[in-house]
Image (cartoon, coloured by chain):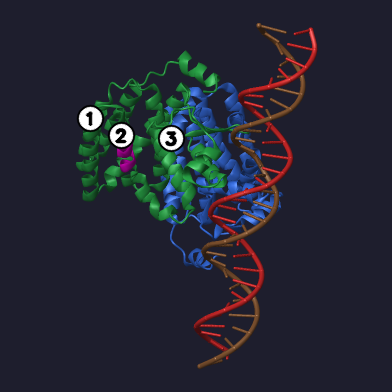
Chain colours: A green, B blue, C red, D brown
Amino acid sequence: MNIADQVYSAADSATQDRAQTIRDQLRDAIVDRRLAPGTKLSEGEVGTLFDVSRTVARAALQMLSFEGLVRTERNRGAFVANPSPEEARQVFASRRLIEPGIAIAACGRVAAADIVAFKAQLDEEGRFIAERGPHARRSEIKASGDFHLLLASVAGNAILLRFMEELVARSSLVIALYGRSGASACGHSEHTGIVGALESRDSGLASRLMLHHIDHIEADLDLRVRAGPALREALNF
Amino acid sequence: MNIADQVYSAADSATQDRAQTIRDQLRDAIVDRRLAPGTKLSEGEVGTLFDVSRTVARAALQMLSFEGLVRTERNRGAFVANPSPEEARQVFASRRLIEPGIAIAACGRVAAADIVAFKAQLDEEGRFIAERGPHARRSEIKASGDFHLLLASVAGNAILLRFMEELVARSSLVIALYGRSGASACGHSEHTGIVGALESRDSGLASRLMLHHIDHIEADLDLRVRAGPALREALNF
DNA sequence: TGCACAAAAATCGTATGCAATCTTTTTTGC
DNA sequence: GCAAAAAAGATTGCATACGATTTTTGTGCA
């Protein structure tokens, strides 16, 4: 499913699989917005749901906590993260810093097979944009994130890829929370432009396009603090 | 102790403390080279050493595994990471990408109190350089890392600070493994220069100095594959 | 002596139990 | 009737137990 999984698989298929699997499923659910921010993820519930003991469920939740997708409070439990506007800004500031460099690195390493993968990815995005409904919208956000992960995997730096995995996941949460949902179609054409720059190995152009792309995504957010979510959070919802 | 701890404390003092504490102690030991790369960290041993059950020890090891300081193999256990030359290159490539940006961000936010903290940090570094012996050398590597973490905390982005924590820790491992140990004194003068740029809020200069600084650190490494370590690793030492 | 195979020890993966903590409900006093 | 206290319930933190897997040790045979 996830682009990054393919790259990682060789490295950590040897680690304990069950918690990993649960983490991946929960992450997908969070990123897809099937689990709303603030939702309680009790160890027991997760355990029974995936048919494992609390020990394994707990390990999965701990992993998600490291990635910033879940917030854990001592003696209270784990909750789907509810990023504040400030956190959202930090996520995008991080991406602005990292992704143009990733685009440059990818230009230097992109192969013909990668271009094919990018084209397939673009087609996938196009499919969901054409469709309507909340499910298509979710898939669209996910596909858009996968594009950035594909780029990071082409760049060939496993550490940066992991950072990007986290940033993309958190971005999806932020977009789901604060997105005005207007300019998502825009993103697709910008992705196309970046692939074009990659194809012609114009690293300067790729870098610039990426920076603008991130700016556009962030510009589509409405990061003004709203009373609604704050109240909801205060009421422990 | 750690600069970053102060920044973090507000955020994650609520999480389970015991595993966190053990993780910090183990991380310090790894970064200080008191635990050599490849050393086995058995759950039971760590547990008895810190007087906790295997459950807690395991959680601490899992955290270190996420940070890349420990490598875990299923049904075999956890080992202090033994970064390959390729991993070392990726660590420094990541730093080259991130840290100049952090320097720029720090320039825009640095306050008078921060400058005081930087000066104190520089003094600390100077002390260890003057001293001799392996202990002073370890402290020197650690102090040098703390400088970069202080800069990241001034930059005011919690996500980037966490990334830098990981990169600095892994860098320390890499330097301990591959460092030619010639140019460490150099680093100090470069740090001084960066603080100067910060003081005059010259973000362009700070960024350039940082980039050169990282290049110099990496240039001091001998990343040629050696038979020695490979053999040692093969022998599971 | 050297090698193959089996038994033993050590270690990990996971489930479960108990105490501590937090939340909710009930009870009690005003 | 309402507020505060107390008890009940739920959930987490941690320790421990047991089966599974790996590593080591020991023994028999060539």
In the rendering, at what x and y percent does residue A12 appear?
44, 53
Looking at the rendered structure, the secondary structure element under dot 3 is: helix
* Mark drawn on residue A139: 2
Residue drawn at x 38%, y 18% is A222
**Which of the numbered marks, if any, corresponds to residue B112?**
none
Q: Nearer the viewer, residue B103 or A170?
A: A170
Residue A141 covered by magenta stretch:
yes
In the rendered image, residue B189, in percent from the top left (x then y), is placed at: 54, 39
Label 1 crowd (10 A; few <14 / some 14-19 / many >=20): few
Q: Which residues are magenta?
A: A139-151
**Which residue position is annotated with label 3?**
B100
Measure how far apart labels 3 and 2 are at the Cα level: 35 Å
Residue A182 is situated, as x and y percent measured from the top left of the image, at: 28, 21
- Determine which quarter of the picture holds residue B10: top right
Observer-nearest of A151 and B17: B17
Tell me the mark number nearer the camera, choosing from 3 and 2.
2
| Residue topped by disc 1 | A131
Decide: marks 2, 1 in contact (CB < 8 A)?
A: yes
Q: Residues within 10 Å of mark 2 (few under 14, many from 20)?
A: some
Distance of label 2 from label 1 (alpha carbons): 10 Å
